[in-house]
Amino acid sequence: MTGAGEWTGRVGGVWAKEWQRTDRSFGELTDRLLDPTALSSFSHALDIGCGAGEISIALATRNPNAAITGLDISSDLLAIARERAAELPNVAFHHADAATWHLDKAAIAPDLLISRHGVMFFDHPVAAFAHLRLLASTNALLRFSCFRERNANGWAELLQGILPEPPTTPDPHAPGPFAFGNEDRVSVILRDAGWKDIAFEPLDYAMIAGEGEDALEEAVAYFLRIGSAASAIAALEGATRERAIANLRAMLADHREQDRIALPAAAWIVTAHAG
Ligand SMILES: C[S@@+](CC[C@H](N)C(=O)[O-])C[C@H]1O[C@@H](n2cnc3c(N)ncnc32)[C@H](O)[C@@H]1O
């Protein structure tokens, strides 16, 4: 489980070191989330759980007349985001919990609320989305991506399969990567928070774990640092640990496609309107 609290400590620090590999892993999902035909025009976008800033930076670059605000609770990730966006005058990052953050009185209410996999970690999702709706402009668009359920995400099953014994099954609704996997649950959360026109688009995409000459070793290094398999492997010792790493390498080698290692992933692109 990755609850909000973990992002402020070790987990955020590890993701900050891995931001390039993480951006690459999202690949086609990013293109779909940012599809200009789906976004329409906006003057102020709020990037919820912006992490190392790829979505904020893409929006700021493509929309120089719009203001972009990125929010995150990890200071390590925000430091990377700020460095990457140093040349962009229209993007600002704030160290803040999106569930309670308040807009400056002088600021324009956001008319686009966007997130790439940054909204599944709220302890109280209805309250968080109700708060976000109240600070949004009347007809604001909410558009975010999140994983579909764990059993639809081949990458998660494959990573589980390399371990000597499966980890205990977490509560599927607990804050974490799969907390928004169930369409009905997310629909109820958004509806109870006051959002309208809620729609779900399923997207099956390739999670790019490694690319280029060293694709396999890149992918091994990535999964030894990021996510629940990394923590599970780190907790193993001796020959058991070596075997798990060998299993990881073999599994990733089986998913080589030309010069990249691609694992099957399944997401929702969720949209809704504030009013
Ligand atoms: C899976 S990462 C995605 C990061 C980024 N959107 C990206 O696509 O690279 C989830 C992010 O949500 C942030 N986060 C979690 N809970 C949050 C909250 N309550 N408010 C703001 N950010 C939060 C984490 O710190 C982390 O950066």
Image (cartoon, helix red, strand yellow):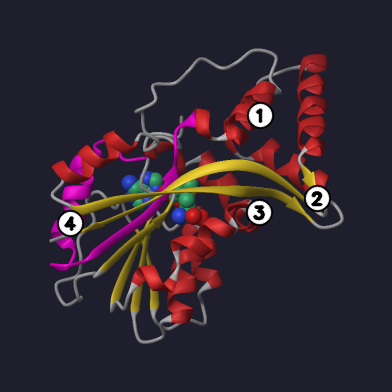
Instruction: Kindly identify which numbered label has been placed on residue 215.
Output: 2
Q: Which residues are magenta?
A: 121-150
Cα distance in 3D space between marks 3 and 4: 32 Å
Residue 111 location (% of width, % of height): 24, 70
Residue drawn at x 62%, y 47% is 207
The residues tagged by marks 1 and 2 sit, at their Cα atoms, a distance apart of 18 Å
From the viewer's perspective, is 191 left or right of 48? left
Q: Which residue is mark 1?
A: 158
**The C terminus sits in image quarter:** bottom left
Query: Could you tell me which secondary element the residue under label 3 belongs to?
Result: helix
* Whether residue 186 is visible: yes
Q: Which residue is tagged 3?
A: 21
Instruction: Tell me residue 251's x, y (percent).
Output: 77, 31
Q: Earlier in the sequence, mark 1 or mark 4?
A: 4
- Label 3: few (<14), some (14–19) or many (≥20) C-alpha neighbours in 10 Å: some
User: Label 3 near label 1: C-beta < 8 Å?
Assistant: no
Above or below residue 82? Residue 261 is above
Spatial distance from mark 3 to mark 2, Cα to Cα?
Answer: 11 Å
Whether residue 8 is visible to the viewer of this picture, yes or no, is no
Mark 4, residue position: 133
